[in-house]
Image (cartoon, rainbow, N blue to C red):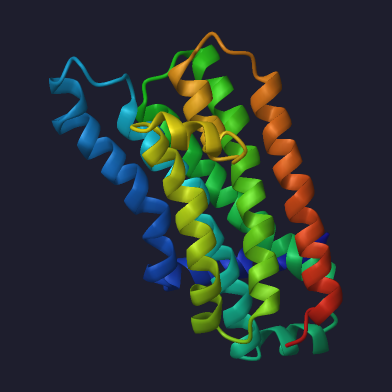
Amino acid sequence: MRIIKAIFMKQAKDMIKNPMVLIQFVLFPAVAFVMTLLVGNNLEDLPDNMFVTMMSSVFAGMALITSMSGIIAEDIETKSLRFLVLAGVKPHQYLLGTGGFVLFAGSLTSVIFALIGNFTGTEAAKFLAIMIPSVAASVILGAAIGILTKNAQAAGGLAMPFAVVIGFTPMIATFNETVEKIAGVLYTQQINVIVNDRTVSLSRPLTVIGCNIAVLTLVFVFAYRKKGLKG
């Protein structure tokens, strides 16, 4: 546990030093806040919290996949991971510490989205019940991509198509019924479901997210068995 905590703190310090990663956890809620303030509150025909929903799904999908994959790939590229292994850090400790930090940071950003959306207590709880597992799903996928690539540039190239599809499809689904039906299998689309219909039960969205996490965990296991965690 002490080693996992040390890795967690290392990633926190690295994030503060790396504005390219840090900005992704600030940019999307900032855009949601500005667009809600300047546009959403002035147009009555727009759905409530439209921009919060859009930006939170983009954040949960796009930002977290690229962040997690980039962190692992960069540690491999700079040989930081090799030094950690030589220092006695086990692969699962590294992954739990690194993934735990990204999950924690993503969860904090999710809370900020909930505050921007002015959700009531029950609405906020339902929103976070969908957002945080979605963050976890992206962390798992990002970890798999990071393991499969040799450097941060390659990780970005491989992660981007997944990030664009998973992050932006729910946004497109807001304006297109056909895309909305297809997007129903994505964990990020469940954010739209729970915000746009506040009477809906959590059971189906959570089931969809659970299935996504199960599939992505299998992808991660495949990636780990294929390449391991070599620095």
x 81%, y 89%: residue: 86
Q: Quadrant of the N terminus?
A: bottom right
Residue 214 x %, y %: 79, 46
x 24%, y 21%: residue: 46
Vertical side of 202 occupied by 27: above or below: below
Vertical side of 80 occupied by 93: above or below: above
Vertical side of 230 occupied by 62: above or below: above
Q: In the image, is 105 to the left or to the right of 116?
A: right
Residue 143 x %, y %: 67, 65
x 27%, y 36%: residue: 33
Residue 164 x %, y %: 45, 57
Q: Quadrant of the C terminus?
A: bottom right
- Toward the top, the furthest residue is 199
x 54%, y 51%: residue: 105
Q: In the image, is 124 to the left or to the right of 69?
A: left
Corner quadrant of residue 16: bottom left
- Work out whether residue 213 can be spotted: yes
From the viewer's side, name the closer residue of 135 and 161. 161
Q: In the image, is 188 to the left or to the right of 117?
A: right
Residue 201 x %, y %: 64, 14
Q: In the image, is 207 to the left or to the right of 135?
A: right
- Work out whether residue 8 can be spotted: no
